[in-house]
Amino acid sequence: MYPSGRWDGFWVQEQYGRQSMRAFELHFSAGRVTGAGRDTVGPFTVDGAYDATTGAVRLVKQYTGKHAVLYAGHPDGEGSIAGTWTIGEHHRGSFLLRPVLAKPTGDEPIQEIR
């Protein structure tokens, strides 16, 4: 459903605006999602689950030595995951995660569309 490997994206929080998450890793296998990376808050790990039928994702982003953030999202129709993050009952915002795809080199074979 989702490709394992490098991802990027952002999260939005009212007082901080849009914050980038660059070149972190996500691995999808048998309904589980794991990974690690870094953003403006610091290094983090990811652990959660996804539904291969609906594409729904629930994961916990745990910052090293700091707080955890719950992410709940769904496919956006273009290969990304969009949704809402929450910390407890009082902090929430939106997020978007997208796979980092290899850029074409021009040497790829031409494939016919049928």
Image: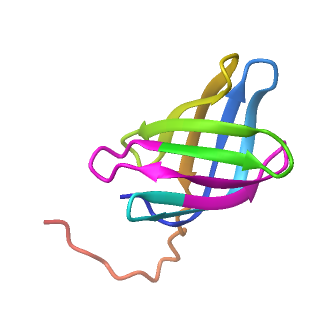
Residue 3 in percent (x, y) is at: 45, 64
Q: How is the image coloured?
A: rainbow
Furthest residue toward left: 114
* 107 left or right of 96 in image: left
Vertical side of 22 occupied by 102: above or below:
below
Residue 86 in percent (x, y) is at: 64, 28
How many marks the image carries: the answer is 0
Residue in the image at 41% along x and 81% along y: 108
Residue 18 in percent (x, y) is at: 73, 31
Q: Depth check: 18 or 50 in front? A: 50
Residue 96 in percent (x, y) is at: 57, 39
Evaluate whether residue 104 shows in this view: yes
Q: Depth check: 37 or 89 in front? A: 89
Q: Depth check: 45 or 21 in front? A: 45
Quarter that holds the C terminus: bottom left
Evaluate whether residue 24 shows in this view: no
* 8 left or right of 103 in image: right
- The question of residue 21 being in magenta is answered with no
Residue in the image at 81% along x and 18% along y: 15
Vertical side of 39 occupied by 102: above or below:
below
Quarter that holds the N terminus: bottom left
Residue in the image at 69% along x and 60% along y: 36
What residue range appears in magenta?
A: 34-57
Vertical side of 90 occupied by 106: above or below:
below
User: Quarter-wise, where is residue 88 in the image?
Assistant: top right
* 104 left or right of 63 in image: left
Residue in the image at 53% along x and 76% along y: 105
